[in-house]
Image (cartoon, rainbow, N blue to C red):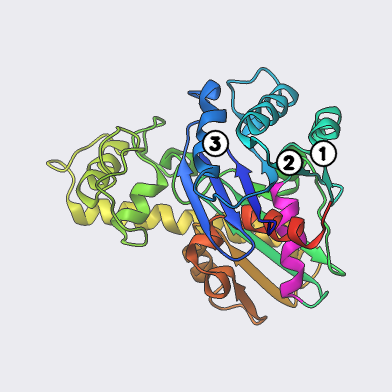
Amino acid sequence: MTHTVLGLDIGGANLKAATADCHAVSVPFPLWKQPDKLGDSLAALIAQFPKTTTLAVTMTGELCDCFPTLREGVLAILDAVEQAASKCKVRVWTTDGDFVKVAKARKDTAKVAAANWHALATYATRFCSNADAALVDIGSTTTDLIAIRNGKPDTVGHTDRQRLVAGELLYFGTSRTPVFAFGLPYIAAESFATMRDVYTVLREISEDETDTDTADNRPATIAFSLSRLARARCADRETMSDEAIRQFATQLRDEQIRRMREAFQKAILSRFTPTTLIMSGSGEFLLHSLFAKVRYPLCSLSHKLGKSVSGCAPAHAVAVLATETPA
């Protein structure tokens, strides 16, 4: 039987699966609301890849506040993976840059927690010919700024907390982040709207009538996004014009880009000048605006591997790495 490796990136809001040959699937899963259903949801996701014999796993979901500690979160996720794995072999990525069995992962949870950025950076080194590079991955919730030096990830921090302080982890993305997080004047500090609404109104993310994972649980359409953004200004579409709402959305977009540019200066350019910039993530569209005027080559994983794979880049990364390094 041909061995088929399936990469899993288990987050707090989405479950992502990908193979080395660029088949990728992302499904929403609010882990903090239903941790007891993680095993069943993973099993359903794995079932979409019937030839799987090995699971290559990385995670970030341990940060969900349904778990008392990060350690307990890692252990709960590993339990769910084993429940879903059936007869599949399970390999777990660590920030040491290798895979371990579940038993060892349980003993060293700190190196397993939030290791997906490290897996992606390790995989991405193949796109920069062992030269100094920067990897920027932006998703629905967070943004990673990762230095690659001499063909290896070279970050100041290794845990999420350390990377936050170093400016290598930005806790905002292009979808789930509440708009008040960007601190613009005259904005309600309440979860009335998210950055998904901003990019829907600006037509950089397609509207989706079936997607109700929004601030008010109404569909992710332009009309409802306009209403949610108006509410964030303590208004509505009767008291605030659509043009004014779009201007507000543009201000939020500009502020997000400004903060990303500032963080890139701190985390990357203050240390070295990359010869290549690698971009990935479901929010990669924003990176093309951010880096439109840079002088070094850009490597887009959306262009190289496809949009769905770029959006599941860490899952694809562990699938490739596990395929290349048999247990």
- The rendered magenta stretch, by its main secondary structure, is classed as helix
Q: Amino acid at mark 1?
A: Lys
First in sequence: mark 3 vs mark 2: 3
Q: Residues within 10 Å of mark 3 (few under 14, many from 20)?
A: some
| Residue 101: numbered disc | 1
Q: Secondary structure at mark 1?
A: loop
Whole-number angstrom distance, CA of label 2 to CA of label 1: 7 Å
The region drawn magenta spans: 116-128
**What residue sits right under mark 2 in the picture?**
90
Residue ID at (65%, 39%): 60
**Quadrant in the rendering for residue 299:** bottom right
Q: Secondary structure at mark 2?
A: strand
Residue 103 drawn at (x, y percent): 83, 30
Q: Is residue 316 above or below residue 296?
A: above
**Crowd band around label 1 with a 10 angstrom C-alpha radius: few (<14), some (14–19), many (20+):** few
Three-letter amino acid code at disc 2? Answer: Val
Say what secondary structure mark 3 lies in: helix
Q: CA distance from mark 3 to mark 1?
A: 19 Å
At 63% from the left edge and 58% from the top edge, which residue is drawn? 316
Q: Which residue is mark 3?
A: 43
Which quadrant holds the N terminus?
bottom right
Relative to 295, does residue 66 appear above or below in the rendering? Answer: above
Q: Earlier in the sequence, mark 3 or mark 1?
A: 3
